[in-house]
Image (cartoon, rainbow, N blue to C red):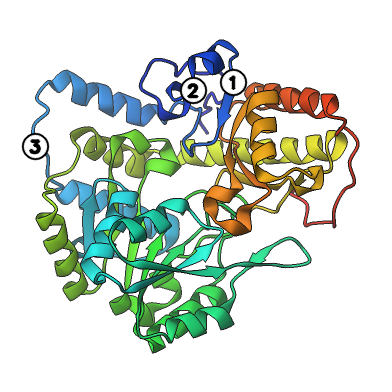
Amino acid sequence: MPTFDFDTPIDRNNMGCAKWDRRTDAEKAANVVPMSIADMEFRGPPCVTEVMERAARHGAFGYTDPDGAYYDAVAGWMRGRHGWETRHAWIVPQNGVVPAMCVAVRAFTEPGERVIIQSPGYYPFREAVLANGREPVFNPLTRGEDDVYHMDLDGLRRQAADPRAKMMFLCSPHNPVGRIWTREELGAVADICGEHHVLVVSDEIHFDLELYGKHIVFAQAAPQMADQCVILTAPGKSFNLAGLQISNAIIPNETLRARLRERVHADGYSNIAYFGYHATLAAYTKGEPWLDAMLAYVRQNFSFLKNWLQDNLPAIRLLPVQGTYLAWTDWRGLGMADAELARFARGEAMLILGQGKAFGQEGEGFMRLNLALPRAELERALERLGKAAKARGFREGTPGRGFAPYPA
């Protein structure tokens, strides 16, 4: 099996990188570490780099359309990695999952209608709904004694029964809590939404990031919903290609597909990104060994973080993760309000983290940490956190309830 280097840091400064170049000049001088935005601090698969170099040397970067090779690659990945048989006709390439979410809101709902969102949840769901004149309805997840999040299906049933509710954004695996939903949970969502004619738009961009569990495509778990669902996928999270702006809406129903295409046309989109096209072909046909190696490395990062917190700062609790490389952590044991917590993390520990409040009120007191980074960088970040906590007198803490440990 080939080996890959996930330990060598990459200097991403002055490359237009959103995560690093958005820092203030003072933060850059202090080398404040960003662990917020969900892309990786790893170089992507060598097979992608090689194909991109060939595409660059070609020199003609004109308009690009998906072709048979592209559809074969996407369908082959869904079949081989996830066991879901798709047809070429179902695949509608898009310029990213978030743009596709906005297109779906405009295509499948009318102004003033309601869209159900499970919270805490990825904040672009809410933004996509509000920016397009629709009303978000929040269906908060519940947190069990084992610290694992679950769906509030009774609440979902009540919300779906509202005739103004026309669509549900499902996040699978869930960002930020890291759940891989079970077949039974997905089936329950399908039953509820199917009964009340609520379209399910399933954001599955993290679908390949299976750390402890097996992802099930919504349409595969609930084939009875094939005519009432849109599956959004992309190679971006899986292979660190987010900047290439390529994704796919997979829609089995012909009528829904036509409505999405009409909306895309009305919004002025056509073709796909030249480099995104070539990167997708390479990643989906040759990138699987790199993906598997990356996941093994990130699992070790989760174990490292878990052990460090238990040994050094047990007042911060790492919640169980199943999918994504994003750690959802509970900082309420430090006794800080949200604004103070943000100042502590960024101004004292010199870490830019994903503030939980951005994911909804259920996220207050939580932080999301991106663990797709070299181990030495993670160690350095935790050293800073430890020093800041010690200066605040937070070194000693009281561990919370026990939770399911990560495998060693």
| Lateral position of residue 1 relative to residue 283, left or right | right
* Amino acid at circle 1: Val
Identify the disc placed on residue 23.
2
| Lateral position of residue 316 relative to residue 184, left or right | right
Whether tag 1 and tag 2 are in contact, CB under 8 A, the answer is yes
Q: Nearer the viewer, residue 74 or 313?
A: 313
Marks 1 and 2 sit apart, C-alpha to C-alpha, by 8 Å
Q: Position of residue 263 (x, y in %)?
A: 15, 61
Q: Find disc 1 in the rendering and name its residue.
A: 32
The C terminus is located in which quarter? top right
Mark toward the start of the polypeptide (2 vs 3): 2
Mark toward the start of the polypeptide (1 vs 2): 2
Q: Position of residue 298 (x, y in %)?
A: 61, 38
Marks 2 and 3 sit apart, C-alpha to C-alpha, by 34 Å
Crowding near the residue tagged with mark 1, few <14, some 14–19, many ≥20 C-alpha atoms within 10 Å = many
In this rendering, is residue 5 above or below 308?
above
Crowding near the residue tagged with mark 3, few <14, some 14–19, many ≥20 C-alpha atoms within 10 Å = few
